[in-house]
Image (cartoon, rainbow, N blue to C red):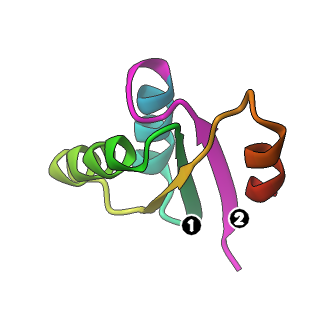
Amino acid sequence: MAQVILITGANRGAGFSILRGLAQRSLLHHYLLGTRRAEKGLKAIEKLHKLGIKAQVDTIELDVTSDGDVGKAE
């Protein structure tokens, strides 16, 4: 079973860069792109695919300041 790696704030900026770098190096992991708005996460995944990323990346709607969202992510 693939190890799951959750990266918050990954739809842009530093989070996106971290996710891109990790996903370029390993296809063995399942990456979760944490974002407050799912549609922004989907756009970021499209951008990753256009950059040639082949790793499994899915989006998860997540606000790290919400205990409920954090609990759902577990």
Identified at 42% across, 49% down, the residue is 38
Per the model, the C-alpha gap separating discs 2 and 1 is 7 Å
User: Where does residue 5 sit, x and y in percent of width and height?
Assistant: 66, 52
Q: Residue 36: which disc?
A: none
Q: Tag 2: residue type?
A: Gln
Mark 2 crowdedness (10 Å alpha carbons): few <14, some 14-19, many ≥20: few
Q: Tag 1: residue type?
A: Leu
Q: Secondary structure at mark 2?
A: strand
Q: Earlier in the sequence, mark 2 or mark 1?
A: 2
Name which quarter of the figure residue 11 lies in: top left
Identified at 33% across, 48% down, the residue is 39
In this rendering, would 13 be left or right of 35? Answer: left
User: Where does residue 54 sit, x and y in percent of width and height?
Assistant: 32, 62
The residue beneath circle 1 is 28
Residue 52 vs residue 8, the one in the foreground:
8
Q: Is residue 14 above or below residue 58?
A: above
Q: Quadrant of the C terminus?
A: bottom right
- Contact? badges 2 and 1 (CB < 8 Å): yes
Name which quarter of the figure residue 29 lies in: bottom right
Q: Is residue 59 magenta?
A: no
The residue beneath circle 2 is 3
The range drawn in magenta is 1-14
Q: Quadrant of the N terminus?
A: bottom right
In this rendering, would 65 be left or right of 5? Answer: right
Q: Is residue 9 magenta?
A: yes
User: Where does residue 72 sit, x and y in percent of width and height?
Assistant: 77, 57
